[in-house]
Image: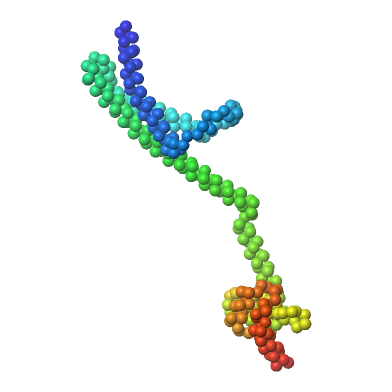
Amino acid sequence: ESVQLIYIQVTIIFMMITLPILLVSMGSNILIVGAQTRFILTMSQIKFKYERIDLIKGFQKLFSLRSIFELIKSLIKIVVLAVIVYSTINPKMNQLIGLFNMEFTQALAFLGSLIMSIVSSVGMFFVFLALADYAYQWYEYEKNIRMSKQDIKEEYRQMEGDPQVKGKIKERQRMMSQRRMMQNVPKADVIIRNPTHYAIAIQYQMGQQRAPIILAKGMDNVALKIIDVAKKHDIPSIENKPLARGLYEAVEINQEIPEKYYHAVAEVLAFVYQLKKGKE
């Protein structure tokens, strides 16, 4: 009977000590999950899914890196809890053994103090664990988002082509177009410039063209190249700032000039023709 009594006493003491720990553990887990999910409840997780009874996928999940991490985390919890409980109870083991020899109020006060010590230590541990787990989950979430953004970029790159490659292609096309344009400059009758910011190469073949056309145009460095090529081929260059700027903005290459510029361009061409006659 004495053995049975001791067994019952130990069981009661064990239950009184472990029950608060279990409650603290359960409450902290609920708070951790709630903080991570913002307490959003869903019924989709309790629905039957065939994938859950797939043995191959089950083994893959069982031996995945995440499952190993969760196992290690659980083992650390158990070890730390055991250390906390042992370090709290061990100094008071003699009092704990003689608990049922104490008066009721004395035993209740002692047991309450012991349980509060354990619960406070366990609670602090679980708060630290919750913060660490929350930080880890947030890190994983941010990493997955970064990976998702990178996947989107890669998919866009595969669909649309590498932006760097496309940029190089456009630059090459621009240079080829500029080279072809420069080859047409010697065919021009006159260069209208402003004075080095804009340069417009104009051609007019009377009887063959309805109106003067723009063979080449450019700004800054391109304008200087047009002027230089024209100089090498003895093509006259006339400075007319408003006309040069207006033609540059209004007309594309190989297009006729608008009707509103007929008079101004005609005056320039007439002046050029007079220069040529004077040289002859």
Q: State whether residue 181 is above or below residue 119.
A: below
Q: Residue at x 58, y 26 (%)?
A: 53
Q: Quadrant of the C terminus?
A: bottom right
Q: State whether residue 58 is above or below residue 195.
A: above
Q: Residue at x 37, y 33 (%)?
A: 126
| Left or right of 166, for residue 280 | right
Q: Residue at x 26, y 15 (%)?
A: 100
Towards the viewer: 43 or 185: 43
Residue 154: percent from left, percent from top:
60, 49
| Left or right of 67, for residue 258 | right
Residue 127: percent from left, percent from top:
36, 35
Q: Quadrant of the N terminus?
A: top left
Is residue 59 visible in the rendered image? The answer is no
Towards the viewer: 156 or 172: 156
Q: Quadrant of residue 273?
A: bottom right
Residue ranking furthest to the top: 1
Figure label count: 0
Residue ranking furthest to the front: 260
Towards the viewer: 9 or 258: 258
Is residue 255 visible in the rendered image? The answer is yes
Q: Quadrant of residue 52?
A: top right
Residue 250: percent from left, percent from top:
63, 74
Residue ranking furthest to the right: 207
| Left or right of 88, for residue 54 | right
Q: Quadrant of residue 224?
A: bottom right
